[in-house]
Amino acid sequence: MEPNDRAIAVMTLRIAWLGPWNVHSSIATFGALIVAELSNRGHTVDIFRSETGSSALLPELPAARRVQRLGEIPAHVLQGSYDAVLANLGDNFAMHGAILPYLQKVPLLLILHDLFLANLAAGWAATLPDGETILRTMVRETYGNAALPAKAPYWTDFARMVAERPLVEYFASFGYGAIVHAHHYETRVRTACLGPVVCVPVVAYVPPDIMAPQPIRDTLTIVTIGHVNRNKQAAEVITAIAALPTLRQSVRYRLIGPVEDSMQRELLDLAARLGVSPPIFTGWASDDDLRRHIEDADVICCLRNPVLEGSSGSMVLGLMSERPTLVSNHGCYAEIPDGLVLKCRPGAEAADVAAHLNWVLSRPESAADMGRRAARFARAVYNPVPYTDGVLRLIEQATPRLPGILAGLAIGRVLGSFGMARSDPAATRAADALADLLDEH
């Protein structure tokens, strides 16, 4: 470790935290946990809200220091007043949009919450003059012209977009360091980010004093948490319940979170056609309501296909609740050790959910033991202390490299003014030569 690095490791830092800060945002509740831990260690953290439009009016989370609106802060103030500016990016323009104008103006350390950031990009482009052209340029600069041919629509098959052009690399390219929450998208970020990338498991808010689960008897309540959208596989859960007579008679399904009217009708119609009890929709739940719903649950469902997020707060909540948890066996969910969750094959979720629920009913003691072991694992791994260690490690690793990165970006702007693409080999050679020169000194 160089002398400068040792100073960064022990000094008191002044940090700007950019992200949503409202009572409806899971990323905001995550942020409150990390900001509190950073503050407990003696660092000064100022919070800047990143919401746009009506989301900027959502009730504010409590904070020990004054919370400021990001759009009102000049870029030079952010750059000149803080040792590190941490920017949280997720796939929701309404929650994160105020960060985007700063991407090219302020050196940022990025916390990339999602693999799929195509909605964030589209929301941003919609606010810009000639936004459609800019949006298509984002894709082509990141993945090549073949990724979005001239007459092809930006929005296409969802799973294909996730696999081929999720746009996390585009946003990662603006950071001089980044945090990811699981290994499944780490390589994508490393190939694009200008500086170091640290992989740290996500931290999620867990309502305090959740009661341990009641012994599983002859009925099951399954709970899915979060915005009810198609990739949460609710239709497959309903199909699974219909697969076996024992499940039809024994299982209730509850979905906790906002839901569009069309999605709610679709799921209710499916349940009616299959002859199973209709799912229960609660809408957005307060902390007290969420605690009550979890305490009433026997099984937590965290299916995702495709996987859009870097990791899942509801998965962490499910594990810590000691309830057996259903997950899809890919993305961040596949990284959970076998034997701690009920893994379901992507594309075969309904069959696997039916088999797992039948096992829970027939082996309740084994299912309860799985829940307890999963909770012990989650408390050790999904914890603000190791996460904050990761944040400080990123700052320590990235800060000494910042002067070289800024110089490289300046060269890139000059070359770009000559019409040279970012991917041009000449640009790469110039950047490599500069990096070698700076390393020597």
Image (spheres, rainbow, N blue to C red):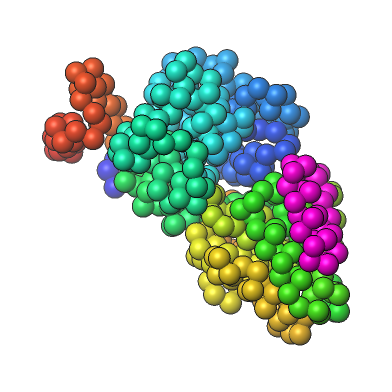
Q: Position of residue 411 (x, y in %)?
A: 21, 24
Given residues 223 and 399, the one toward you in this image is 223
Q: Is residue 176 left or right of residue 235?
A: left
Q: Position of residue 434 (x, y in %)?
A: 16, 32
Given residues 150 and 391, the one toward you in this image is 150
Q: Is residue 194 left or right of residue 323?
A: left
Q: Position of residue 341 (x, y in %)?
A: 62, 71
Looking at the rendered image, the quarter that the C terminus falls into is: top left
Q: Position of residue 165 (x, y in %)?
A: 41, 44
Q: Is residue 105 left or right of residue 28?
A: left
Magenta span has 96? no
| Res 169 → quadrant | top left
Q: Residue at x 71, y 67 (%)?
A: 239
Q: Residue at x 21, y 21 (%)?
A: 419
Magenta span has 267? yes
Please say if 29 is above or below 58.
below
Count of marks placed on residues: 0
Query: From which residue to which does the magenta span run?
Result: 259-287
Given residues 10 and 347, the one toward you in this image is 347
Q: Does the image show residue 101?
A: yes
Q: Residue at x 43, y 57 (%)?
A: 183
Q: Does the image show residue 175?
A: no
Please say if 299 is above or below 167.
below
| Res 353 → quadrant | bottom right
Q: Residue at x 27, y 43 (%)?
A: 2
